[in-house]
Image (cartoon, rainbow, N blue to C red):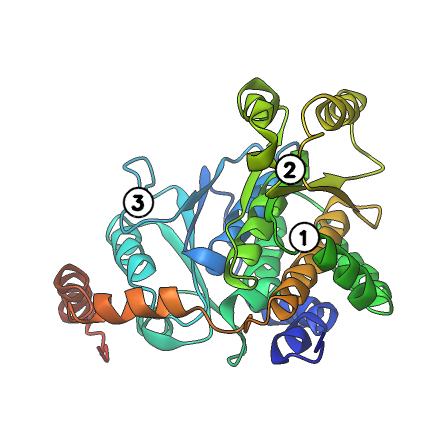
């Protein structure tokens, strides 16, 4: 297997990217604690909101919501902190939701490498974390997620998040020595199957993120769920015919810190429900803090998705179907509704927008 693919180099930069992301976030202004934190974004730019929600589930008294849509919910308002995330800065759904947030008087922060979102933030005086260009958006996760952790600590959602991020960088760096071989072994067991990833607790969105990476990098269908919810519906689906179920593989995300009730549910599900699938794999987290553990599973799982792509002889960098859909959406001239909203901002606030 050719394992020197261009995509891999971005993941081997993750430890440095985490530290750089912390540094780039230091210039954010002081903000008061919000009543709600809403993250607007799509794809790899949105997942950080889900990861932050899971990370702070037992720590923060502020709800965290991720909006993957053109429109914000009605309950996002002036007391909300809205983080607009678009790697390119040109994601049409994010730009429309950004314009709504600005109109409603929400506190706003953006994470982007530039584009129209960068222009808007500069001229509307919206705080921005500028991240480096040149990454495939999904490979830029540290730059898209870690600034949220920095901001979360600074607005009083939780303490110690910056320290956890620094420890995560150290843990990931220690993993790089052997991670490629571990990822290859996982990928070889997944060939010819549909990966299903099961998480729990802080790994709920980690499981979903890995599902999307098998979609984008490996070019295979993939699905995700979490304990204990899956024990109340999805688990019955594994009672199906063997010739159908043997097309699936299941990845169980594990931790030395998993609660006893979750540990027992995982063991029972493996024993009672998963005996017909092609492969059952376990990815064990590393590190002592929640953020370390989340990032360690993500790094190994995402590199495994690239290794699976190479085994399947597909290019993990290319996302042809996404590009086709974007091309046809551009034929709508960047959506007249979005154009109209941005031009209203331009007229009212004297913003110069290059569309």
Tell me the residue that label 2 is attached to: 198
- Which of 294/151 is in front? 294
How many numbered discs?
A: 3
Closer to the camera in the image, 143 or 197: 197
Q: Classify 175 as above or below 107.
A: below
In three-dimensional space, the C-alpha distance between marks 2 and 1, rounded to whole angstroms, equals 15 Å
Q: Is residue 273 left or right of residue 288?
A: left
Q: State which quarter of the image contains the N terminus.
A: bottom right
- Quick one: label 2, few (<14), some, or many (20+) residues within 10 Å? many
**Between tags 3 and 1, which lies in front?**
1
Q: Is residue 156 visible?
A: no
Judging by the rendered image, the residue that carries numbered circle 1 is 190
Which numbered circle lies on residue 225?
none
Of the two numbered discs 3 and 2 in the rendering, the one whose residue sits closer to the viewer: 2
Residue under label 3: 72
Find the distance from the CA under tag 3 to the CA under tag 1. Answer: 38 Å
Local SS, label 2: strand
């Amino acid at each position: 297997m050719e394992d020197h693919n261009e995509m891999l180099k971005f993941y081997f930069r993750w430890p440095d990217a985490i530290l750089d992301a912390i540094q780039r976030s230091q210039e954010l202004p002081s903000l008061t604690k919000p009543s709600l934190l809403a993250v607007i974004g799509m794809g790899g730019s949105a997942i950080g909101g889900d990861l932050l929600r899971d990370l702070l589930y037992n720590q923060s008294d502020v709800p965290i919501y991720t909006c993957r849509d053109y429109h914000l919910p009605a309950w996002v308002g002036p007391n909300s902190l809205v983080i607009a995330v678009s790697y390119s800065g040109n994601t049409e759904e994010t730009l429309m939701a950004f314009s709504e947030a600005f109109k409603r008087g929400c506190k706003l922060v953006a994470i982007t490498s530039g584009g129209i979102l960068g222009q808007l933030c500069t001229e509307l005086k919206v705080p921005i974390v500028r991240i480096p260009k040149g990454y495939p958006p999904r490979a830029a996760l540290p730059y898209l997620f870690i600034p949220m952790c920095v901001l979360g600590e600074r607005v009083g959602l939780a303490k110690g998040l910056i320290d956890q991020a620094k420890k995560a960088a150290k843990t990931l760096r220690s993993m790089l020595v052997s991670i490629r071989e571990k990822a290859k072994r996982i990928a070889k067991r997944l060939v010819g199957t549909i990966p299903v990833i099961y998480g729990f607790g802080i790994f709920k969105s980690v499981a979903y993120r890995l599902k999307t990476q098998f979609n984008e990098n490996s070019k295979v269908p993939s699905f995700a769920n979490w304990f204990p919810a899956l024990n109340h519906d999805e688990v019955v689906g594994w009672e199906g015919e063997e010739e159908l179920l043997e097309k699936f593989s299941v990845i169980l995300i594990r931790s030395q810190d998993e609660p006893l009730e979750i540990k027992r549910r995982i063991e029972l599900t493996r024993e009672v429900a998963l005996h017909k699938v092609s492969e059952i794999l376990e990815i064990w987290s590393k590190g002592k803090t929640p953020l370390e553990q989340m990032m360690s599973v993500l790094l190994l799982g995402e590199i495994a998705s690239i290794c699976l792509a190479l085994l399947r002889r597909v290019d993990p960098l290319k996302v042809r179907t996404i590009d086709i859909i974007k091309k046809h959406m551009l034929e709508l001239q960047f959506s007249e509704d979005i154009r109209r909203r941005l031009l209203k901002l331009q007229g009212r606030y004297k913003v110069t927008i290059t569309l």
